[in-house]
Image: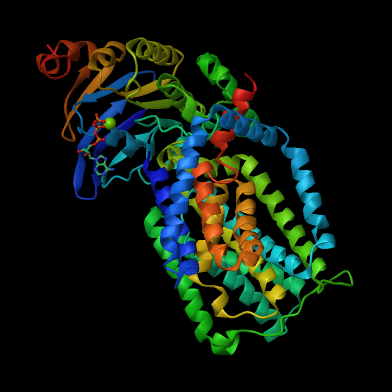
C-alpha cells in the first residue's frame, strides 16, 4: 500500500467516524452495536469474496453498468427530471438539497480528485458565493439573481486565486491545514462584519428569481433549475477532464516531478484547478442562498466541509459520477431512513461501512477498476 | 552544447552537489557514474530545473538555464527521464506519451507519438492499458518514450537499467545507442558502470557531490581506481 492510498484510507475512516459520531451522541450504547454490525459485514464480505458465484455475479453487474452507461445515464436523467411529478414536496426539497451538494461535490472533486490536493475548508467558497448573492440582491439591492450568480462564482474564484497563489506551492498536508484555516476565517468574518453580513443573524429575504417571466419559486421549478445547473457543470467539467488539460491535472496528481520534467507548469495547473473548484463552489453557494431565502454563518461549518469531502471520497475519488452519487447517498439516505427513527443512524453507518468493504474505491470506483473490467470483457 | 559550471545544490541542510562542472558536446553520449548518494541524480535535477541550484551556471546552446523553471527548460530541448520511471499510473500508455508532448501542438504530438511507437513497438500493443499495469521493462520503455515525445536535442536518462532483467537492459541500451546515432545527444546516469562505459564516449566519476575523475570512457574503463571501485576488479 503506497503512502497516498494509506492517507486516503485513514481519511476514509476519519470521515466516517466524524459522520457517525454526532448520530451516536448520547447513545454510546449503540457503539458496541455499531462495531458488531461492522464485524458481521466484514465476515460476510469475506465469505462473499470466497463465493465464486457471488464474485461472478458482481462482475457481471459491473460490466453491464459500464458497458451500457449511456442509456443508463439517459434513464437516470429522465428519472431526475420526472421526479417532482411523483414525489411529495418534502422529498423534492430533499432532492434539491442533494443537487446543491452534488454541484458542490463535483466542484471539490476537481481539486481533490483530479489534481490530488486535499482541501479541508471548501465550504468557505460556498459561503462566499451565498453571501455575495445575499448581499448584492437582498442587502444592497444592487442587482438581480442573474447577475449575482456569475458574480458569486467569480468572487469565489478571486478568493481561490488569493488563497492559492501563496499556498499552492505547499505540499499536501500543509495545504489542507491552510484551507481549513481559510474556511474558519471566512466564518469569523461573516460573524463579525455585521453591517454587511448581518453577523450571526445572517441575511433575510433573499428572493427566488424569475426566468423568462417564469417564477422559480415553486419547489419543482427550483428543483429543475438546480438540475439544469448540475448538468451544465458536469458537461463543462467532463469536457475539461477529457481534454489534455484534464489529463495534465491527473499527471500532476500522479507525479509532480515527472509532470514538471515533461514541461507541465505544475503550479499553474494547481492554481487553475483550485480556482475552478472555487468558482463552481461559489455558484453553488449562490443557489443555496436563493433556495433558503435566508443565510447565516451556521450553515457553513467545518462539518459541512467534511461532509462534502466524504461525498467525493465515498462516491469514488476522481470521478464525476462518483461525486454526484456520493452527494445523493449522503443527503437522501439519512432522510429516507427517517421513519426508522432511532435505528436510522445505525443503518446509515452500516451502509457506509458496507460501501467501504464491498467498494473500497467508492461507489463508482476508480478508472483503474473500470478499465480492468473492460479488459476482461474483451477477452 | 551543454555546459555546467561549478553548480551547488542543497536539500535543506544536505549539500548534495558541491561545485560540479561538466560539458556535453552535440552528438555525444556522456555518462555520470558514482556510488549511491554521490549526487548524480541531483546534477540532472539541477540541469532540468526540477530542483533549484544555489550557485553556478548552466548554459545550453549558449543560453543560460539556471533561472528558468522546469517547464520552460523542456521547451529549450532538454528532456529529463527521471530515476524510478515515475510514469503516471492512472493514465493510459497513450495518455502518458501525449503528456510528454504537452508543449507540442495537437498534430505534431500525434506525429511524434507515431515515431516513438515505432521505436518501442511494445508500447503500441499496450496503448490503451493503464501505465500502472505495465511490467517494469515496459514502464521503462514508456518513461523513455515519454521523454522523447518533446523531440529533445539532449536526453537525460537516470538509471534506465534499474530493476530490469539483463536482456531488457541490453535492449534498452541498444535503443539508446541507435537514438544517439540518429543525432540525439545523451547524458546518462548509470549504476552499471560496465555498460555505461561501454556505450558512452566520455564519462565523469562523481563522489560525494564532486567530480573526481573524467575522460574518455575507454580510458576510464582501464583506470585502476575506476576498476576497483565500480567495475569490481
Ligand atoms: N529530496 C531529498 N531530500 C533530502 N536529501 C536528498 C534528497 N534527494 C537526495 N538527497 C541526498 O542528496 C545526496 C545525493 O543524492 P542523489 O539522489 O543525487 O544521489 P545519486 O548519485 O543519484 O545516488 P543513487 O545512485 O543512489 O541514485 C544524497 O546524500 C541524498 O541522501
Ligand atoms: Mg540517483
Q: Residue B33: x and y, percent?
A: 23, 23
Query: Does residue B72 show up?
Result: no
Q: Would residue A129 be found to the left or right of residue B1 on screen? A: right
Looking at this view, is B219 or A248 the one in front?
A248
Q: Residue at x 47, y 30 (%)?
A: B132
Q: In the displayed structure, would residue A150 be above or below residue A134?
A: above
Q: In the displayed structure, would residue B31 be above or below residue A22?
A: above
Q: Residue A349: x and y, percent?
A: 52, 57
Quadrant hosting residue A173: bottom left
Query: Does residue A376 show up?
Result: yes
Quadrant hosting residue B140: top left
Q: In the displayed structure, would residue B97 be above or below residue A284?
A: above
Q: Residue A323: x and y, percent?
A: 60, 52
Q: Residue A269: x and y, percent?
A: 52, 49
Q: In the displayed structure, would residue A330 be above or below residue A370?
A: below
Image quadrant, ligand 1:
top left
User: In which quadrant will I find the N terminus of chain B?
Assistant: top left
Q: Residue at x 20, y 26 (%)?
A: B34
Looking at this view, is B138 or B119 the one in front?
B138
User: In which quadrant will I find the C terminus of chain B?
Assistant: top left
Quadrant hosting residue A205: bottom right
Amino acid at each position: 500500500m503506497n503512502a497516498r492510498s494509506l492517507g486516503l484510507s485513514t481519511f476514509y475512516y476519519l470521515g466516517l467516524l466524524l459522520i457517525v459520531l454526532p448520530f451516536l451522541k448520547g447513545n454510546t450504547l449503540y457503539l458496541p452495536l455499531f462495531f458488531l454490525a461492522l464485524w458481521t459485514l466484514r465476515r460476510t464480505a469475506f465469505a462473499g469474496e470466497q463465493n465464486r458465484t457471488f464474485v461472478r455475479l458482481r462482475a457481471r453487474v459491473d460490466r453491464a453498468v459500464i458497458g451500457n452507461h449511456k442509456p443508463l445515464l439517459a434513464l437516470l436523467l429522465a428519472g431526475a427530471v420526472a421526479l417532482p411529478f411523483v414525489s411529495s414536496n418534502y422529498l423534492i426539497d430533499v432532492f434539491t438539497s442533494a443537487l446543491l451538494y452534488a454541484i458542490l461535490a463535483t466542484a471539490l472533486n476537481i481539486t481533490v480528485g483530479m489534481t490530488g490536493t486535499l482541501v479541508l475548508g471548501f465550504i468557505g467558497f460556498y459561503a462566499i458565493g451565498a453571501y455575495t448573492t445575499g448581499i448584492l440582491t437582498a442587502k444592497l439591492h444592487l442587482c438581480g439573481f442573474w447577475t449575482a450568480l456569475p458574480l458569486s462564482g467569480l468572487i469565489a474564484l478571486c478568493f481561490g486565486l488569493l488563497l492559492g497563489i501563496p499556498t499552492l506551492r505547499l505540499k499536501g498536508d500543509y495545504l489542507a491545514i491552510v484551507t481549513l484555516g481559510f474556511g474558519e476565517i471566512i466564518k469569523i468574518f461573516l460573524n463579525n462584519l455585521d453591517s454587511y453580513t448581518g453577523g450571526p443573524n445572517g441575511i433575510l429575504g433573499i428572493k427566488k428569481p424569475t426566468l423568462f417571466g417564469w417564477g422559480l419559486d415553486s419547489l419543482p421549478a427550483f428543483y429543475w433549475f438546480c438540475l439544469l445547473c448540475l448538468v451544465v457543470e458536469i458537461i463543462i467539467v467532463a469536457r475539461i477532464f477529457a481534454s489534455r488539460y484534464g489529463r495534465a491535472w491527473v499527471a500532476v496528481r500522479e507525479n509532480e516531478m515527472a509532470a514538471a520534467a515533461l514541461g507541465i507548469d505544475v503550479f499553474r495547473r494547481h492554481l487553475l484547478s483550485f480556482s475552478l473548484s472555487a468558482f463552481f463552489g461559489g455558484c453553488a453557494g449562490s443557489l443555496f442562498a436563493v433556495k433558503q431565502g435566508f443565510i447565516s454563518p451556521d450553515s457553513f461549518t467545518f462539518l459541512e466541509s467534511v461532509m462534502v469531502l466524504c461525498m467525493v471520497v465515498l462516491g469514488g475519488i476522481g470521478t464525476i459520477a462518483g461525486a454526484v452519487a456520493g452527494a445523493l447517498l449522503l443527503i437522501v439516505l439519512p432522510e429516507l431512513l427517517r421513519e426508522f427513527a432511532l435505528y436510522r443512524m445505525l443503518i446509515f453507518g452500516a451502509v457506509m461501512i458496507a460501501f467501504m468493504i464491498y467498494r473500497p474505491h467508492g461507489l463508482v470506483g476508480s478508472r483503474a477498476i473500470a478499465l480492468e473490467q473492460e479488459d476482461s470483457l474483451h477477452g | 552544447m551543454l555546459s555546467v559550471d561549478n553548480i551547488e545544490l542543497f536539500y535543506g541542510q544536505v549539500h548534495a552537489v558541491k561545485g560540479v562542472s561538466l560539458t556535453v558536446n552535440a552528438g555525444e553520449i556522456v555518462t555520470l557514474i558514482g556510488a549511491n548518494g554521490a549526487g548524480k541524480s541531483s546534477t540532472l535535477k539541477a540541469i532540468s530545473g526540477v530542483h533549484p541550484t544555489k550557485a553556478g551556471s548552466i548554459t545550453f546552446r549558449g543560453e543560460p538555464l539556471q533561472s528558468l523553471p522546469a517547464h520552460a527548460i523542456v521547451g529549450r530541448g532538454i528532456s529529463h527521464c527521471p530515476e524510478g520511471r515515475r510514469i503516471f499510473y492512472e493514465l493510459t500508455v497513450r495518455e502518458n506519451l501525449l503528456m510528454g508532448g504537452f508543449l507540442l501542438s495537437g498534430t505534431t504530438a500525434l506525429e511524434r507519438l507515431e515515431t516513438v511507437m515505432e521505436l518501442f513497438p511494445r508500447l503500441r500493443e499496450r496503448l490503451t492499458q493503464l501505465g500502472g499495469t505495465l511490467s517494469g521493462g515496459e514502464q521503462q520503455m514508456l518513461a523513455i518514450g515519454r521523454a522523447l515525445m518533446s523531440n529533445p536535442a539532449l536526453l537525460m536518462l537516470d538509471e534506465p537499467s534499474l530493476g530490469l532483467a539483463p536482456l531488457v537492459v541490453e535492449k534498452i541500451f541498444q535503443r539508446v545507442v541507435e537514438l544517439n546515432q540518429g543525432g540525439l545527444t545523451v547524458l546518462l546516469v548509470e549504476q552499471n558502470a560496465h555498460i555505461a562505459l561501454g556505450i558512452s564516449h566520455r564519462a565523469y566519476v562523481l563522489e560525494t557531490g564532486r567530480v573526481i575523475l573524467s575522460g574518455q570512457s575507454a580510458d576510464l574503463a582501464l583506470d585502476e581506481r575506476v576498476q576497483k571501485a565500480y567495475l569490481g576488479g
